[in-house]
Image: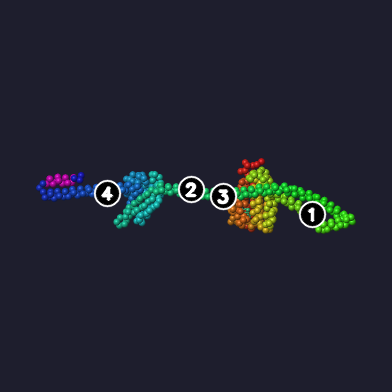
Amino acid sequence: MANDPASSVEKDAAAVPSESADVAGLRRSVELLTQQVAELQKDNERLRHVEWFADSIFDNIPDMVFVKDAEHLRWVRLNRVAVEDYIGRPREWLIGRSDADVFPPEEAEFFNRIDRAVLASGKMLDVPEEACHTPRGIRYIHTKKIPLLDEQGVPRYLMGISHDITARKRVLQELEAKNGQLEEAIRSEQEAHHALKQAQSRMLQSEKLAALGSLVAGVAHEVNNPLAFVINNVAVLQRDFAEIIELLQLYREAETALGQADAQALQKIRAAAARMDVVYILENLQSTLARSREGLSRIQQIVRDLREFSRQEAVGTVQQGTELNTGIAATVNIVRGQAKSNGVELEMDLTPIPGITCSPSRINQVVLNILSNAIDASGNGGKVMIGTRAVDGGVEIWVQDSGPGIDPAVRDRIFDPFFTTKPQGKGTGLGLSISHGIVADHGGSIRFESTPGQGTCFTVFLPLVPARTEARIVK
Ligand SMILES: Nc1ncnc2c1ncn2[C@@H]1O[C@H](COP(=O)(O)OP(=O)(O)O)[C@@H](O)[C@H]1O
Ligand SMILES: [Mg+2]
């Protein structure tokens, strides 16, 4: 086709041989034209090459690249990644369409809003993260939106370059989740460690108490035997002395007769009697012996209480039908000394209660802890009452004191191991935490009511039979 005009000119020139000058001119023009056409063809080819070159760069960019017209935001160019990976529609179909034709409405609306903002500002905008629905599911992209300005600085087009950050985002999310799990693991590890330490010290303390219990039981047992015969002997002494005194009385009555028979002997007897104050001895011997027996029976009671308190069952052994009142009375006797030195009056109100299944020595420990706290709280002139009562499904032991009450600020912490408000060396802060553990082991509960300035009442509930220990009952 490029040669057609030239050949037709040649034909015309041949048809008019007479006008040779014109023909020569024409021929020159034709040559010129032919030359120009050839150059145009070359230019065209160069242009096509440039276009191919630009297209192939554009198409081979591994990120999504698109260009929209500034007026309607319709696509004018899209590279292969945009067409194939992100939209999945033919390029010819896409040209002249916009986001609303392929993305869900809110997403298209979001993209449009940003596009308009970029065009209005005339500046590039970096959008670090956008969600985009694609045929491969939702992808997360990092997009740079660039306005393309004409010579007057008016935005004509908008170019977008989007890099897929889905994989990176997933890895980040996984890392965050892993991090969370790790933090959680560390936290529970720390909690377990803390709980273990607390359990360890509670165990140590209750082991110490158990060891102390068997020590006390051993001493009480050893003291009991000699005590029994001392008590017996004193009783015999008292009886025999009564008789000796009677005999002495008879001798004294015979003094006049003795003086007549042997005045010297009588004088010796009278001197000795004056020296040892026989009148006083005779008057007081009986009451001295009576007071000694009283003291001995008090010692006997203490020994009995100590034995009752530290009943020699194996630690944690549960006994059926335990009568709690006896153990409580024994424990009250044990803290009498503490009460007396603190100037605290102790009162008991033990009512008949059914026997329960429990570990008696451990319940005594609980009573001792609570009583001892109540005495500590009450102070000089104070009063502590302990009582028992039968309740639905079990028994209750209550201890009421006249102390200052428990500060509401520490209410929630008094059962914590090592929590104490007492001076160093006085409180360990373990009494209530151990008691709580023992009562919980029995399936029971400890509660308290406390009004600042009006004292505190602790109540221990114990079920008739603890559900959990049924299997360990010793018959
Ligand atoms: N009856 C009570 N009145 C007032 N505070 C009490 C009473 N019983 C317990 N508490 C408080 O609970 C804390 C913890 O008691 P406990 O565990 O027995 O440890 P400790 O007696 O060694 O301090 C006490 O230090 C005290 O502050
Ligand atoms: Mg205590």
Tell me if label 2 and label 4 are in contact, CB under 8 Å. no
Tell me if label 1 and label 3 are in contact, CB under 8 Å. no
Tell me which label, 1 or 2, sits earlier in the chain.
2
The mark closer to the camera, 1 or 4, is 1
The mark closer to the camera, 2 or 3, is 3
In magenta, the rendered stretch is 4-16
Distance from the alpha carbon under mark 1 to that under mark 2: 84 Å
Task: Say which residue label 2 marks.
Answer: 181
Report if residue 468 is visible in the image. Answer: yes
Distance from the alpha carbon under mark 2 to that under mark 4: 56 Å
Task: Say which residue label 4 marks.
Answer: 50
Q: Is mark 1 within 8 Å of ligand 2?
A: no
Task: Say which residue label 3 marks.
Answer: 197
Task: Say which residue label 1 marks.
Answer: 285
What residue is rendered at 82% in x and 57% in y? 272
Amino acid carrying label 4: it is Val
